[in-house]
Image: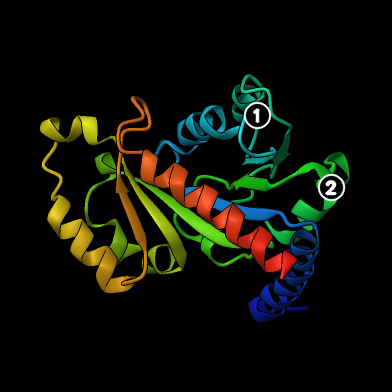
């Protein structure tokens, strides 16, 4: 019986991810890996972000999901290029999946590529996709225990959005405790308390994206 070693799988994926990142960098494309649980609000955040930034930046989206094109259909309404990847039960995207769909995009006409990963708080953190930064959406309805239960996700995320703050009055969510845990795991994380439904609190997120895109362009030009 042949046994596949996990390190070999991750090693091959990481090599492909490095190649993808080099490609994106050569094109001046800033790339985000958007992660979070099912129902955390990733797609709604993406919709609000696209409507806010699509007249300022050249954008495209890769949507990852187990089945259906429901999320890609929502993103298509924002009038930006979008590609759906269905994993047919797989719990995460990998770099080879991203590579396989890139011919469908004109990389020379992009400033920002956002990859919405499969809803999961475990596997997506382990597989690099060629991104520059990881972003995590945590809904307050999930509870404040998630940073300590899934530390790798929070450790690797450059920006963390605490979503659905409009529901705070109806929960026992401890905002101070979750922030203390997040910064204990990742002192350098940027954090926004927001409602992706109403767009409350999202301006720091929009500003951060524009800043990161500009820094990427400057690095390429230097």
**Coloring applied to the structure:** rainbow
Residue located 47% across and 60% down the image: 122
In the image, is residue 63 above or below residue 36?
above
- Taking depth in this image into account, of 196 and 66 the one nearest to the observer is 196
Alpha-carbon span between mark 2 and mark 1: 22 Å
Residue located 71% across and 54% down the image: 29
In the picture as drawn, the residue positioned furthest to the top comes out as 77
> Which of the 4 image quadrants contains residue 57?
top right
Residue located 33% across and 25% down the image: 198
Q: Secondary structure at mark 1?
A: helix
Where in the figure is residue 164, as x and y percent of width and height?
Answer: 29, 35
Give me the disc on residue 189.
none
- Taking depth in this image into account, of 195 and 116 the one nearest to the observer is 195
Q: Secondary structure at mark 2?
A: helix
Q: Please state if 41 lies on the left or on the right of 198 as rendered.
A: right
Residue, disc 1: 72
Q: Please state if 215 lies on the left or on the right of 4 as rendered.
A: left
Where in the figure is residue 56, as x and y percent of width and height?
Answer: 61, 35
> Which of the 4 image quadrants contains residue 10?
bottom right
Crowding at mark 2 (Cα within 10 Å: few <14, some 14-19, many 20+): few
Where in the figure is residue 96, as x and y percent of width and height?
Answer: 78, 59
Crowding at mark 1 (Cα within 10 Å: few <14, some 14-19, many 20+): many
Q: Is residue 120 visible?
A: no
Front: mark 2 or 1: 2
Among the two numbered marks 2 and 1 on one chain, the one whose residue lies closer to the N terminus: 1
- Quarter of the rendering occupied by the N terminus: bottom right
Residue, disc 2: 108
Q: Please state if 185 lies on the left or on the right of 174 as rendered.
A: right
Residue located 37% across and 46% down the image: 204
- Taking depth in this image into account, of 210 and 23 the one nearest to the observer is 210
Q: Is residue 141 visible?
A: yes
In the image, is residue 83 above or below residue 6?
above
């Amino acid at each position: 019986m042949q046994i596949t070693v996990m390190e070999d799988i991750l090693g091959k994926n990481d090599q492909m991810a490095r190649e993808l990142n080099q490609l994106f960098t050569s094109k001046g494309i800033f790339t985000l890996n958007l992660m979070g649980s099912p129902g955390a609000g990733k797609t709604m955040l993406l919709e609000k972000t696209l409507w806010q930034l699509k007249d300022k930046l050249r954008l495209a989206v890769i949507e990852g999901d187990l089945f259906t094109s429901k999320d890609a259909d929502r993103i298509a309404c924002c009038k930006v290029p979008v590609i759906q990847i269905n994993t047919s039960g797989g719990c995460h995207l990998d770099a080879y999946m991203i590579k396989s769909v890139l011919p469908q995009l004109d990389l020379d006409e992009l400033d920002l590529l956002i990859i919405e990963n499969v809803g999961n708080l475990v596997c997506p953190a382990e597989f690099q996709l060629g991104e520059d930064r990881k972003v995590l959406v945590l809904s307050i309805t999930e509870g404040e225990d998630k940073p300590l239960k899934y530390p790798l996700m929070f450790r690797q995320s450059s920006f963390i959005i605490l979503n659905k703050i409009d529901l705070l009055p109806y929960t026992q969510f401890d905002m101070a405790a979750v922030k203390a845990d997040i910064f204990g795991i990742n002192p350098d994380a940027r954090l926004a308390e927001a409602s992706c439904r109403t767009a409350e609190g999202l301006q720091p997120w929009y500003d951060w994206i524009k800043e990161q895109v500009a820094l990427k362009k400057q690095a390429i030009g230097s």
